[in-house]
Amino acid sequence: MKKILFLVLFLIFCFFLTGRPLYAATIRSFTVSPTSITFAYQDPDLGEVTSSPSLSVDFSIRQLYANQNWTLEIRADTDLGIIPAGNIRWTVTGRGNPTPTFYNGTLVRGSYLLSGTGRGRNTGRASITASFYFYLTNAWSYPTGNYSGTVALRLTVPGAAAQTQTVTLSTNIAARAKLEFGLAAMSFRDENPDTVPSIPANVNALSVTSSARTGSSQTATLTCLASGDLIAGTNIIAISNMTWTATGTGYQAGTMNKGTAQTAGSWTGSGQRVGTFSYFLVNSWSYTVGNYSTSINYTLTAP
């Protein structure tokens, strides 16, 4: 009887010292929605890809008092296939009572990072709602394919087992090609054939950027095809008199052709390749006076 009375008196004494009963906190509910998040397919030059939709996290806790904290952590369980988890960052906002504190960050595979924390109330209750947005660093270097990975969110309170929810992140990297030139037109000056046997174009060296997404073992190819010879009325300068040189990995020199597309560049796998072309026209006394023109079509193919 004395022992029971002593225990009751001790618990009452602890209640007044701590301001709460000596109970462990309880996670009453912990939900995430949806459980699958996607990153849309878009031009890598546009920057990060925002997840769609956002991730909603809701939880409520009982018997969590003002001198106790809850924590919400996030961890990348896996990479997204060949895309490192570190290429994904998150931002989080939310509300609750008491007011929580949230933290933005970048995912780390296999390690939990703090994304939110807060205290309980004198009533012993806490209810929190948070919204997570994920951002994928986009890059031309990603090979085509469907990639996915999982992210875990862990809620921890004093005196109770932590609870975890898992979300799948996924993206589809489809084939894409983008070709950019520094200028879209060029010209050759009228020069003395004896002193300038090869006339350089006014644009030399013309910058070119070939961006392609394809399979890791697939070949992206850049070709050029002249629409015809250089023509001024009824006068003609054969397009084969026009050649080009190239700089940059994978870019190739060649001679213009109006019947067969000529290879101007070739690369294995995805990537963004920068180079230059310099154009030259064979000069000759045999050319008839006139303003000559043609068009050249460049095609970048990413299978």
Image (cartoon, rainbow, N blue to C red):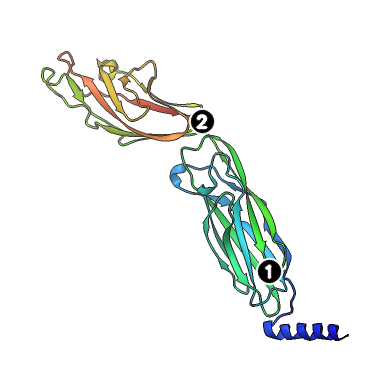
The residue most toward the front is 2
Camera-nearest residue between 23 and 7? 7
> Which residue is identified by label 1?
158
Tell me the tag on residue 68.
Answer: none
The residue most toward the top is 286
Q: Residue 35: image x %, image y %?
A: 67, 51
Neighbours of disc 1 within 10 Å: few (<14), some (14-19), many (20+) = some
Whether residue 290 is situated above or below residue 121 in the rendered picture:
above
The residue most toward the right is 1
Nearer to us of marks 1 and 2 is 1
Whether residue 269 is situated above or below residue 150 in the rendered picture:
above
Q: Earlier in the sequence, mark 1 or mark 2?
A: 1
Q: Secondary structure at mark 1?
A: loop
Camera-nearest residue between 123 and 223? 123
Q: Amino acid at mark 2?
A: Ser
Q: Residue 100: image x %, image y %?
A: 59, 70
Q: Quadrant of residue 156?
A: bottom right
Q: Residue 210: image x %, image y %?
A: 40, 33
Instruction: Identify the residue at image location x=72%, y=65%.
Output: 160
Q: Is residue 81 visible?
A: yes
Instruction: Identify the residue at image location x=64%, y=53%.
Output: 152
Whether residue 195 is situated above or below residue 148 in the rendered picture:
above
Q: Secondary structure at mark 2?
A: loop
Tell me the tag on residue 216.
Answer: 2
Q: Residue 184: image x %, image y %?
A: 31, 34
Q: Amino acid at mark 1?
A: Pro
Camera-nearest residue between 221 and 247? 247
- Judge from the rendering whether residue 41 lies leftward or rightward of residue 37; answer left or right: left
Instruction: Identify the residue at image location x=74%, y=79%.
Output: 21
